């Protein structure tokens, strides 16, 4: 347990240094490594976690959005990364308003292409620099975004 706690502290320190100590909040509930970053820090955080030999989070295992409807930044996008060498998982979370654009992470994790398309299709969130942002699950004639809490079938 002490070894893991030390590793978590080193990982936090590494990311904070890479982000030039912008005051980003870092949480670790229930001994789970979790970073909550602003959208301007997202690419730097993910790139640091992926490319650093100490962390080696080379796999994007999931990416999903949550619609909070009544909060200031309506949506949160969660990125789940895995390090095979460390056998550890980390979550990176960023908040985004309805009409804002997030940077695409496809240059860092190629499989983000499909995740970002799904988030665009279901929530209407747009990713700046995405190689082909278009609907993936719904027909192109579908109006609205089915997983938004303000979506109505009528």
Image: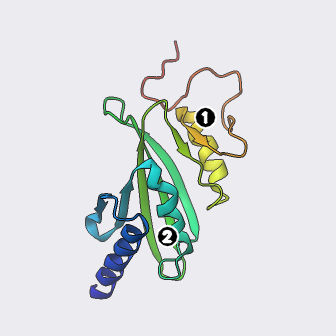
Q: Are marks 2 and 1 in contact (CB under 8 Å)?
A: no
The x, y position of residue 4, in whole percent, is: 33, 82
Q: Quadrant of the N terminus?
A: bottom left
| Up-down relation of residue 91 to residue 6 (above or below) | above
Horizontal arrangement in the rendering, residue 135 relative to residue 122 (left or right):
right
Residue at image position (61%, 20%) is 143
| Up-down relation of residue 30 to residue 69 (above or below) | below
Residue at image position (55%, 70%) is 50
Q: Of label 2 and label 1, which has the lower sequence position?
A: 2
Hey, which quadrant is residue 47 in on the image? Answer: bottom right
| Up-down relation of residue 17 to residue 93 (above or below) | below
Residue on which the image places disc 2: 49
Hey, which quadrant is residue 61 in on the image? Answer: bottom right
Residue at image position (34%, 68%) is 32
As rendered, which of 137 and 38 lies closer to the eye? 38
The x, y position of residue 120, in whole percent, is: 59, 37
- Please tell me how crowded label 1 is: few (under 14), some (14-19), or many (20+) other residues with Cα within 10 Å: many
Residue at image position (37%, 60%) is 35
The x, y position of residue 30, in whole percent, is: 27, 67
Q: Which mark is residue 121?
A: 1
Secondary structure of the residue carrying tag 2 is helix
Q: Identify the coloring.
A: rainbow
């Amino acid at each position: 347990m002490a070894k893991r706690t030390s590793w978590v502290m080193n990982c936090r320190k590494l990311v904070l240094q890479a982000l030039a100590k912008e005051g980003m909040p870092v949480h670790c509930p229930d001994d789970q490594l979790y970073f909550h970053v602003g959208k301007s820090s997202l690419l730097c955080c993910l790139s640091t976690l992926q490319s650093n030999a100490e962390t080696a989070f080379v796999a994007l295992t999931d990416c999903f959005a949550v619609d909070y409807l009544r909060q200031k930044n309506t949506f949160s996008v969660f990125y789940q990364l895995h390090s095979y060498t460390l056998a550890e998982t980390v979550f990176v979370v960023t908040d985004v308003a309805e009409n804002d654009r997030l940077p695409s992470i496809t240059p860092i994790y190629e499989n983000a292409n499909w995740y970002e398309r799904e988030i665009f299709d279901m929530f209407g969130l747009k990713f700046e620099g995405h190689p082909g942002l278009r609907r993936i699950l719904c027909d192109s004639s579908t109006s609205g975004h089915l997983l938004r809490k303000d979506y109505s079938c009528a």
